[in-house]
Image: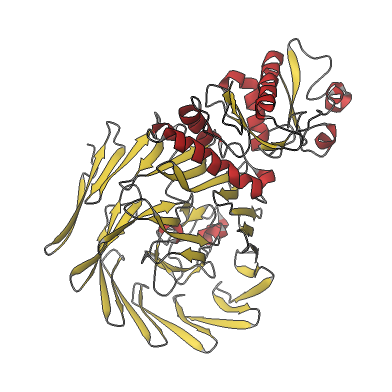
């Protein structure tokens, strides 16, 4: 088995918990089994995970773009989508936006160094707009949340000295090694103590005293909160040491099960299963029956903006353990999500060819949308899904096909209509999930009724598909991403301009034999036409004429079968990873 871990036994006295693992012939994990049941995994031919099925019936599918970058995650139970996250990426792979099945949307922007500049969250009645400013070395000097400004001042060693939030001042002090010693706000001080290894050993605030112990490897083994001691039994045979069992008075109070990531925890008579987003943050907990018990929202740096539910779950932002102080324990150091900084100086020296890594307190290079820091030493690409791909994952969901198709398409398309990010919808973010849902669950019945009609161009329209995909990705002739969400123009834009000198470098006249000038968005879309081309919002490409005409006929059939009227929205998806082209109407009609 090439050294694969077959089982883990967490044992304390008479108490033990055994987790077993199975692998395929390529040493890929295919099942994780504990006393709660089996979690199974499926993969494609190149080793990317297709889906995960938990013991409580939750099925998680993943979708990627043509470059194998994660663009969507969907969690479903008995055909009902209970959580989904679709992402739009720029050409460099940075996340620009996220749309959730609830309609919540988030848009991010960055500076030239990749640091987060702005986060805009639309969430019904509770929108949140946040802007960040940095100094030359990456220290956050200003944060503005819904027009409330916080400013930060630092000493010559980049240590945060004062934080001023609209006149409310917080002051910080440090020891000679750069460890945070005190934090004083409105006359209340939290103090910190460390051992010779610069490991946090005690915090004290307003009568609450917490003490910590560590093993030889620097991993926390015990926490004493005002006399209530919790002992941690850790598994060091993981990429990052992780807690298998928590004990008080030698009695287990919580046990944890891991596969490639944390699957569940068991406490008392109840068990909870984790639902993650692309960062690896816990966004939901479900019980043994697959019912959602808790949901979590965060800002980009991990401060909780909303928690619904009462579960005693410690593993939240980026899937990491939240301490009772409100900071996150990231093994080598503790992280304060409210200021986006570590409380101790980094012993990792950084990379001289990447100056931002030389900063001693900065979390995730000031880009927490893309990176995490589970070791407390060095940032890494975010999330439990960073190496997982899905190109056909939902095809393995074999039960409740009609319901899955209906709810998947509804869950994936409905948020687009009410989101402020609708003009930035990426086809790549949805192509994999929509294709597999449509082919496996919607092709032979008419119960899959998306909120808007969908047209999908696949390999059979190769040249046309390539152009649409490139245009949506930002690699079209206009060099900026074009939305997959279009509105019908009942009387199409005039196309004579495609034969003028305006476009001669892309579509010369006369045309080469059998070639036509394709435009995206289409002439039959309000976003198409010459005027939008002049604004840099239309991409052109010379492609095979027969392919172009065939694709146009497919679009016309969708309009007619759906009854798409002037101004109606429709979704255009394109990927040569999938063989066929098709459409699905709002009435559930599948056509080719």
Q: Residue 160's spot in the image, x, y percent?
A: 55, 75
Give whichever of 440, 507 is nearer the camera.
440
Q: What residue is shown at x 61% (from left), y 30% (from top)?
A: 585
Q: Residue 256's spot in the image, x, y percent?
A: 28, 57
Height in image: 200 above or below 377?
below
Q: What residue is shown at x 25% (from left), y 64% (from top)?
A: 268
On the rendered structure, is 366 left or right of 328?
Answer: right
Q: What residue is shown at x 43% (from left), y 56% (from top)?
A: 284
Q: Residue 248's spot in the image, x, y percent?
A: 22, 72
**Is residue 174 visible in this depiction of the protein?**
yes
Q: Residue 191's spot in the image, x, y percent?
A: 43, 83
Q: What residue is shown at x 67% (from left), y 17% (from top)?
A: 550
Quarter containing the C terminus? top right
Quarter containing the N terminus? top left
On the rendered structure, is 444 left or right of 518?
Answer: left
Height in image: 147 above or below 465?
below
């Amino acid at each position: 088995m090439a050294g694969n871990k077959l089982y883990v036994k967490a044992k304390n006295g008479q108490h033990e918990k055994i987790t077993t693992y199975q692998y395929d012939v390529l040493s890929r994990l295919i099942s994780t089994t504990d006393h709660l049941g089996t979690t199974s995994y499926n993969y494609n031919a190149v080793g990317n995970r297709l889906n995960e099925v938990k013991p409580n019936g939750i099925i998680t599918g993943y979708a990627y773009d043509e470059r194998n970058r994660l663009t969507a995650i969907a969690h479903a139970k008995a055909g009902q989508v209970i959580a989904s996250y679709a992402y739009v990426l720029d050409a460099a792979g940075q996340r620009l936006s996220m749309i959730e099945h609830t309609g919540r949307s988030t848009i991010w922007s960055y500076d030239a160094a990749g640091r987060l500049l702005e986060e805009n969250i639309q969430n019904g009645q509770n929108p949140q707009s946040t802007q960040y400013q940095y100094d030359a070395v990456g220290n956050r000097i200003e944060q503005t949340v819904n027009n409330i400004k916080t400013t930060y001042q630092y000493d010559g060693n980049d240590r945060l000295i004062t934080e001023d939030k609209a006149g409310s001042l917080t002051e910080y002090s440090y020891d000679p090694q750069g460890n945070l010693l005190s934090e004083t706000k409105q006359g209340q001080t939290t103090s910190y103590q460390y051992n010779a290894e610069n490991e946090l050993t005690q915090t004290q605030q307003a009568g609450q005293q917490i003490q910590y112990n560590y093993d030889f490897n620097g991993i926390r083994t015990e926490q004493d909160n005002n006399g209530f001691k919790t002992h941690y039994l850790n598994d060091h045979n993981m990429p990052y040491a992780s807690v298998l069992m928590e004990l008080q008075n030698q009695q287990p109070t919580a046990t944890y099960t891991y596969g490639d990531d944390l699957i569940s925890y068991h406490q008392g008579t109840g068990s909870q299963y984790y639902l993650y987003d692309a960062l690896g943050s816990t966004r939901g907990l479900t019980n043994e029956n697959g019912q959602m018990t808790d949901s979590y929202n965060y800002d980009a740096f991990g401060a909780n903006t909303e928690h619904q539910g009462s579960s005693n779950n410690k593993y939240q932002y980026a899937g990491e353990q939240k301490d009772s102080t409100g900071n996150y324990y990231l093994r080598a150091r503790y992280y304060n999500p409210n200021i986006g900084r570590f409380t101790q100086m980094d012993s990792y020296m950084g990379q001289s060819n990447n100056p931002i890594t030389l900063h001693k307190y900065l979390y995730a290079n000031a880009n927490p949308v893309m990176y995490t820091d589970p070791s407390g030493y060095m940032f890494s690409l975010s999330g439990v899904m960073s190496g997982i791909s899905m190109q056909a994952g939902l095809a393995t969901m074999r039960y409740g096909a009609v319901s899955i198709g209906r709810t998947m398409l509804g869950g994936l398309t409905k948020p687009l209509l009410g989101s402020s990010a609708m003009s930035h919808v990426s086809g790549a973010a949805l192509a994999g999930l929509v294709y597999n849902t449509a082919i496996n669950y919607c092709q032979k019945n008419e119960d899959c009724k998306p909120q808007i009609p969908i047209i999908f161009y696949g390999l059979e329209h190769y040249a046309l598909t390539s152009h649409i995909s490139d245009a949506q990705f930002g690699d079209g002739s206009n060099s900026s991403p074009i939305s997959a969400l279009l509105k019908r123009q009942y009387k199409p834009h005039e196309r004579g301009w495609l034969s003028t000198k305006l476009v001669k470098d892309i579509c010369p006249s006369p045309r080469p034999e059998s070639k036509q000038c394709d435009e995206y968005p289409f002439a039959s879309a309000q976003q198409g036409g010459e005027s939008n081309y002049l604004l840099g919002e239309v991409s052109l490409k010379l492609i095979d004429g027969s392919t172009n005409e065939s694709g146009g006929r497919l679009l016309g059939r969708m309009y007619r079968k759906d009854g798409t009227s002037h101004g109606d929205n429709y979704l255009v998806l394109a990927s040569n990873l999938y063989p066929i082209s098709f459409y699905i109407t709002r009435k559930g009609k599948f056509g080719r």
